[in-house]
Image (cartoon, rainbow, N blue to C red):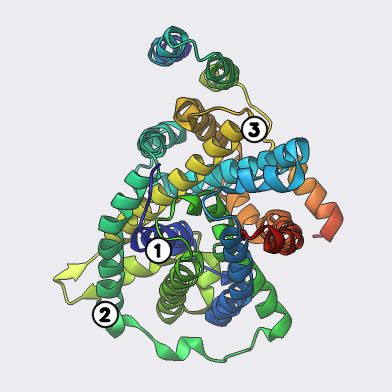
Amino acid sequence: MFVIVIAGYILLGIYEFVPLYKEKRWKEFYVNMVLTFISFSLALLISIDVKIPSPVKPIEAIIKTIFGR
Amino acid sequence: MVKITDKEAICIMVLFLLGSSIVIGTGIEAKNDAWIAGIFGLVLFIPFAFVYARVQSIYIGRDLFEISRLMFGKIPGAVIAALYSWYSFHLGALVLRNFSEFVNITTLYNTPLIVIILSFSVIIIAAARSGIEVIARVSTYALPLVILILIFMEVISIKQMKFNFIKPVFVNGFQKIAMAGFSAFSFPFAESVLFLGVFYSLKSRNSTYKVLLTGTLISGVILIMMTLLNIFILGIVVEDFYFPSYSSFSRIRLGSFLQRMEGTISVSYAITCFIKTSICLFVACKGVASIFGLDDYGVIAIQMGLLMAYFAYIVYDNTVEMVNWALKIYHYYAIPFQIIIPLIILITAEIRNRGKNTKGRDDGETE
């Protein structure tokens, strides 16, 4: 599975980053790079069946302590 | 600059508000009094519609993120923009997850959830990347279809309805109905706070009030009708279904000719969810772009969309958790985004506007 993910992200990278690089839009390039890095790591973790803790659980815990439900 | 007409904005708004509540229903904690809760939520929302519309009409042609930066300065403005980007991103992920669970439970039993989420997110990304004008045009074609389907189904289901299921009215007590009403307020009506990130593109200058109120009223009426239909067909057990509208539509039959019509609600659900998630993604991308000062939000749409899809996948472990969050936690979680921050923005905007107007009178200019 993770081979597909890597291949997919390489294609996506070519599609997205080459035009940005050519046009020298560095701000867009770096923001997109960070987002791609996060999403690639998540995709890789999901593809090898790692259980990622849900970010909603802490929010739920806070709400439960505040409202007591 | 991209512009949308009032009519298109109303269409987006109605489809957005129908979003996932068309199948999950509003205020179903109140069982057979859910329709009262729906009306309560709608009435409760009207003052807030005025709040949102007033904020937009003070800063015509600017989106929520620009407004917050103009009012609170660079860093606090960026914090508010980040909060709303998160809310929008999270809401989009929740709707995406709801829809994918729905498809997984009702139609594609053996397909892995991630496949459904990813295939749905492809069209969402395409829509958000194409911009608000494209979403608006799709909505104008989709809204009549959705409304026609719902009216047709309501009419042919009359024979199946048992009108005494609605009785005894007010049996759940005022407190429970009020709580359910509050939950109907926050999901879906007050979610329209996200439209502060869309209304900057309205063609006519002062139509925010019209769009917000008309959109809310139309979708409110449709939702309350759906809730009533579910109560008339399913009775007080309506709360026990994950997707009450789907269950009630699957019971509709007209002789042996028309039966198992639940596909129609799936189509409406797909359309409304598509519009809702694309608006959420659009606003989230706009927010991130404004935080980092990007000229074009479109370049980050693909990655944000993929992140939204992964987030939708990891956010809950199972359906029970999803329904629990939607019905028990969500309306508390949404209070700051839907009530507190808009009120702060409005008060600050009014104070600033007043100061500007008195100053502007001397200079001979008004905002």
User: In the rendered structure, which disc, 1 or 3, sits on the residue that comes first in sequence?
Assistant: 1
Q: Amino acid at mark 3?
A: Ile
- Which quadrant holds residue B33? bottom right
Q: Chain of mark 1?
A: B
On screen, residue B292 above or below B326: above
Relative side of A53 to B156, left or right: right
Question: Which SS class for mark 1?
Answer: helix
For the point 25% across and 69% down, the residue is B148
Badge 3 marks a residue whose secondary structure is helix
Quarter of the image where one finds residue B191? bottom right
Q: Chain of mark 2?
A: B
Q: Mark 3 or mark 2, which has the lower sequence index?
A: 2
In the image, what residue occupies the spot 56% across and 82% down?
Answer: B36
Q: Label 1: few (<14), some or many (≥20) within 10 Å?
A: many
Tell me the CA gap for discs 1 and 2.
25 Å
Does residue B313 lie above or below B211 as drawn?
above
Mark identifier at residue B291: 3
**Cα–Cα gap, marks 1 and 3:** 28 Å
Q: Is residue B245 left or right of residue B309?
A: left
The residue identified by callout 2 is B155
